[in-house]
Image: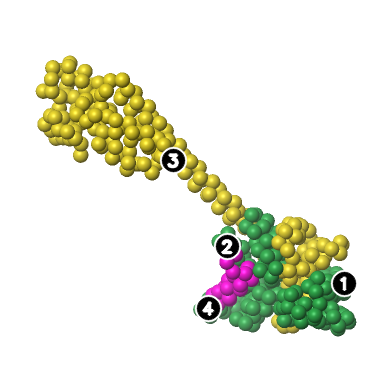
């Protein structure tokens, strides 16, 4: 056997081999039976020098452990940790992606409805049915308009700028600073007290405010 | 060096699925562990059983080992706990000698069985190994003998041995290696001859 290799083995047995050499030798040692046998004899020499009485020097423990381990699953602890880390990163990236997507759609929507008309920025959320108990008086400043159920098959809920701004600020942790800034800027340029184009056209169709039911947001 | 680098390297290999690296750790520490367990149980066969169980427990727990302590320190604790539990459970359970047993077969009682290592041939081989190693050490040149004894008996690092012997660390490494090689050459003959003789007896 290579004398340098044996010298390294002896140093590794004493935990005196540099880390880089240790890596290479450990790889070889775990696969080379002759090297393992030599390593085992080094352990026997140590046991005799320490006069470990009561210890059987040709112990069968290693063989029995080896046999028992054939029934054990191969460990992949570090690999599992790596996979877990990758999953966390993937989840994080997914969350950021969703937040960015929502922000982009919001900006697009706001710009679409705010451009050219000088109308206020009011978000409209589709609703299947409004609970009857929630209908309140008209012209409430912090309310959103719910058309009469009998007249519209898909009534709309409008969200005033204040609440939308609160929503954006509350969820700012999930959006990029630049998109958050654009969204808030868009909200700030809107003038309070005016209605969205859809609300105006609705009022014209109904002839005033009387037919519109106002719904206070809970 | 001396920061448990080689053990940690092997441990990391096991944690990445290399079972062969665990064999290397078992080969290194089996004698120490059996010796440790014999403080709690006097029967060598039982001590080997407990050491075996401790190694298997260590293997199963290895994914949780982070290297905060030396591997042997961690293994030591597992072995001590396994030995204590074995003693407690042995004290609680009555010895069950089956008087109706008509033949000694593979299911021979744990407390009464003889392992290969305890057979007369095994004990003779152990004595022969011991005598051979001691004789080889006696024949070593003084500087080699001092270096290997300071390392194995006193547990000194290469640096400490170098300071003690007044020579460079590289020289210490070389002396210890040459001492081991000289002893190993004699030991190999015993192992090969001993194992062959055991097979003949069987």
For the residue pair B201 and A95, the one nearer the viewer reads as A95
Examine the image and state in which quarter residue A149 appears.
Answer: top left
| Residue B35 vertical position relative to residue A115 in the rendered view, above or below | below
Could you say which quadrant of the image residue A211 lies in? top left
Label 4: element kind: helix
Q: Which residue is mark 3?
A: A95
Q: Percent from the top left, x then y, of residue A199?
A: 21, 22
The answer to whether B163 is drawn above or below residue B70 in the figure is below
Q: Give residue B53's quadrant in the image.
A: bottom right
Magenta stretch: dominant secondary structure: helix
Left or right: residue A78 versus residue B198 is left
Callouts 4 and 1 on one subunit: yes
Extent of the magenta region: B67-85
Does A114 sit above or below residue A164?
above
Quickly name the residue at label 1: B185
* Alpha carbon separation for disc pair 2 and 1: 38 Å
């Amino acid at each position: 056997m290579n004398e340098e290799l044996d010298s390294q083995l002896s140093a590794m047995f004493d935990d005196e081999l540099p880390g880089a050499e240790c890596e290479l030798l450990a790889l070889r040692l775990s696969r080379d039976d002759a090297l393992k046998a030599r390593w085992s004899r080094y352990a026997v020499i140590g046991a005799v020098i320490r006069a470990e009485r009561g210890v059987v020097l040709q112990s069968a423990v290693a063989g029995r452990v080896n046999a028992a381990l054939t029934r054990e699953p191969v460990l992949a602890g570090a690999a599992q940790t790596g996979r877990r880390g990758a999953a966390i990163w993937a989840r994080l990236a997914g969350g950021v992606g969703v937040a960015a997507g929502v922000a982009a759609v919001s900006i697009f929507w706001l710009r679409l409805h705010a451009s050219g008309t000088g109308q206020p920025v009011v978000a409209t959320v589709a609703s299947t049915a409004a609970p009857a108990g929630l209908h309140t008086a008209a012209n409430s400043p912090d309310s959103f308009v719910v058309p009469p159920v009998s007249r519209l098959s898909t009534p709309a809920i409008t969200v005033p700028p204040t609440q939308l701004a609160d929503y954006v600020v509350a969820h700012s942790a999930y959006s990029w600073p630049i998109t958050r800034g654009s969204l808030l800027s868009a909200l700030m340029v809107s003038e309070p007290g005016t209605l969205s184009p859809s609300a105006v056209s609705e009022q014209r169709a109904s002839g005033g405010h009387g037919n519109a039911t106002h719904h206070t947001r809970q | 060096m001396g920061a448990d680098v080689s053990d940690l390297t092997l441990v990391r290999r096991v944690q990445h699925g290399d079972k062969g690296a665990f064999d290397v750790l078992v080969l290194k520490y089996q004698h120490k562990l059996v010796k440790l367990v014999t403080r709690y149980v006097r029967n060598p066969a039982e001590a080997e059983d407990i050491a075996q169980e401790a190694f298997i427990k260590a293997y199963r727990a290895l994914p949780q080992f982070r290297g905060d302590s030396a591997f042997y320190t961690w293994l030591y604790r597992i072995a001590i706990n396994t030995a204590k539990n074995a003693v407690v459970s042995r004290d609680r359970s009555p010895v069950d000698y089956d008087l109706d047993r008509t033949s000694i077969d593979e299911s021979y009682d744990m407390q009464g069985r003889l392992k290969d290592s305890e057979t007369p041939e095994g004990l003779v081989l152990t004595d022969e190994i011991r005598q051979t190693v001691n004789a080889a050490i006696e024949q070593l040149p003084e500087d080699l003998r001092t270096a290997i004894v300071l390392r194995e008996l006193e547990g000194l690092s290469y640096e400490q041995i170098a300071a003690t012997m007044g020579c460079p660390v590289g020289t210490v490494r070389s002396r210890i290696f040459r001492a081991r090689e000289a002893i190993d050459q004699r030991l190999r003959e015993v192992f090969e001859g001993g194992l062959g003789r055991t097979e003949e007896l069987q």
